[in-house]
Image (spheres, helix red, strand yellow):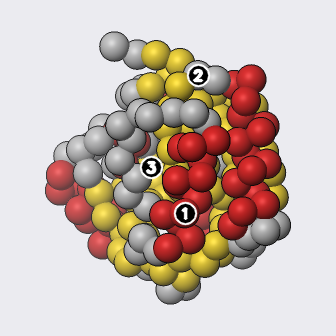
Amino acid sequence: MKTNAITYWLVPAEPARGFFQDLINDLARRYEAPGFEPHMTIHVGLNRFHIAQKVTAKAAVCCGRIEVKTLEVNHSSEFTKTLFVQFALNAKLSRLNKIIRSAAEDSSDYQFKPHLSLLYKKMSVSQRRQLAHSIKLPFSHVVFDSVKAVRCLSPTRRRVEVEGWHVVAASLLSG
């Protein structure tokens, strides 16, 4: 069953932001897939858009910019993780997840596994594997400098649902 939800994103700073946006746009064109803003989903919870600005503001003052180690480009059969960059979980990411979950007054069962998706598309395992192996990242760490709250349908499984995402709040990380 699909429901409206608020998803909280961590957004990369430049130069990683530009690199990922160009890569996402290129893959979207090549594979007739939806384009989207590069992000790491920190939490997916209830559709409480009326408190989203409070949540992003609280997250922004608590954590400051967050540097995260890249691990690998990977793939899965899950639509929103067709092709993705896997990151190492660190203390600041865990803290941010807890802060957002608490501020959002939300006990959803979202399992935080730090990654940044590059492509949303149904593809064969061999296509995904080949594509994952073809992408080389020019950096070993990525800095994230803002948090956004985005209204979406959950779970997202189709292009039209991605195209319906709407940012309802955003804050720069400053703490």
Question: Is 65 placed above or below 76 here?
Answer: below
Q: Quadrant of the N terminus?
A: top left
In front here: 76 or 175?
175
Q: Estimate how packed mark 2 is, as few (under 14), some (14 to 19) or many (20 or more) residues with alpha carbons within 10 Å.
A: some
Residue carrying label 3: 119
Residue 48 place in picture, x, y as percent: 64, 23
Badge 3 amino acid: Leu
| Label 2, label 1: how far apart the Cα atoms are | 22 Å
Answer yes or no: is residue 48 visible: yes
Residue 73 place in picture, x, y as percent: 37, 69
In front here: 73 or 57?
57
The image quadrant of residue 66 is bottom right
- Residue at 55% over, 82% down: 141
Q: Quadrant of the C terminus?
A: bottom right
Kind of element beneath mark 2: loop
The image quadrant of residue 121 is top left
Determine which of the numbered discs, if any, sits on residue 95 in the image: 1
| Label 3, label 2: how far apart the Cα atoms are | 25 Å
- Residue at 29% over, 57% down: 75
Residue 50 left/right relative to 155: right
In front here: 98 or 35?
98
Badge 2 amino acid: Asn
Answer yes or no: is residue 23 visible: no
Contact, CB < 8 Å: mark 3 with mark 1? no
Residue carrying label 2: 47
Dot placed on the residue nearer the N-terminal end, 3 or 2: 2
Instruction: Please state which of the two labelled residues, at mark 3 or mark 2, is closer to the viewer.
Output: 2
Dot placed on the residue nearer the N-terminal end, 3 or 1: 1
Dot placed on the residue nearer the N-terminal end, 2 or 1: 2
Labels in figure, total = 3
Kind of element beneath mark 3: strand
